[in-house]
Amino acid sequence: MASDSLSVVVRRRYDAPPELVFRAFTDPLLLPRWFSLGADIAVDVLAHVLRPEGRFRFRYREPNGTVSIVTGQFREILPPGRLVFTWTWEEPHPHAGIETLVTVEIVADRSGTKVTVKQERFPDESSRARNAEGGAHAGPDGDAVRPGLVRELARRGRTARGSSRGVR
């Protein structure tokens, strides 16, 4: 039986406003970079319906040919501060069939944003520990990709404020 104490919590700070960070979590055009596990791993958005009970499906392609699919369902969407969704890997991934719950809290912090991602409902300590080492928001390679995307969005946002065009 899963325990609520079997969770992974990751905290990050980004130099961009909460609206842009929320967008990185929810815009299908940005998701491949935001959810990347590293610069050499491609992420394809196969499905993405951003509404309560809407579903998503991503494909991860590694350089060695390994392909992994993850699916989930949105439970709560409160822009720009909160996003809750399930996360389930498909076979043959080592975590296949384990549905976890991911809660993303996005809070303004001075001129930036604090993000707390909590993934919970792991069935055992072994599953939790494997995810803590290499999850989408725990792995060090993803941290190399995400800040660059946030900086790019922040630059676009500053540029868009000075013109009649919006951030696309």
Image (spheres, grey):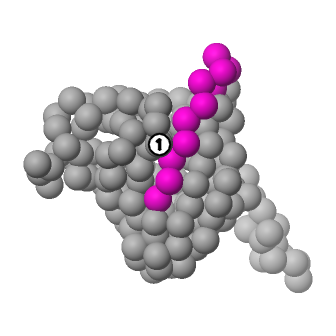
From the viewer's perspective, tell me whether residue 153 is left or right of residue 11: right
- Few, some or many C-alpha atoms within 10 Å of disc 1 (few <14, some 14-19, many ≥20)? some
From the viewer's perspective, tell me whether residue 156 is left or right of residue 100: right
Magenta residue check for 28: no
Considering depth in this image, is 108 or 73 the residue closer to the camera? 73
Q: Please say whether residue 157 is visible from this viewpoint.
A: yes
At mark 1, the secondary structure is loop
Residue 65: x percent and y percent?
66, 21
Looking at the image, how many numbered discs can be counted on the residues?
1
Residue 161: x percent and y percent?
78, 76
Above or below: residue 34 compared with residue 41: below
Dot 1 corresponds to which residue? 90
Above or below: residue 91 compared with residue 7: above
Going 15% across and 49% down the picture, which residue do you hit? 2
Above or below: residue 63 compared with residue 27: above
Going 46% across and 76% down the picture, which residue do you hit? 53
Q: Amino acid at mark 1?
A: Glu
Q: Which residues are magenta?
A: 62-72
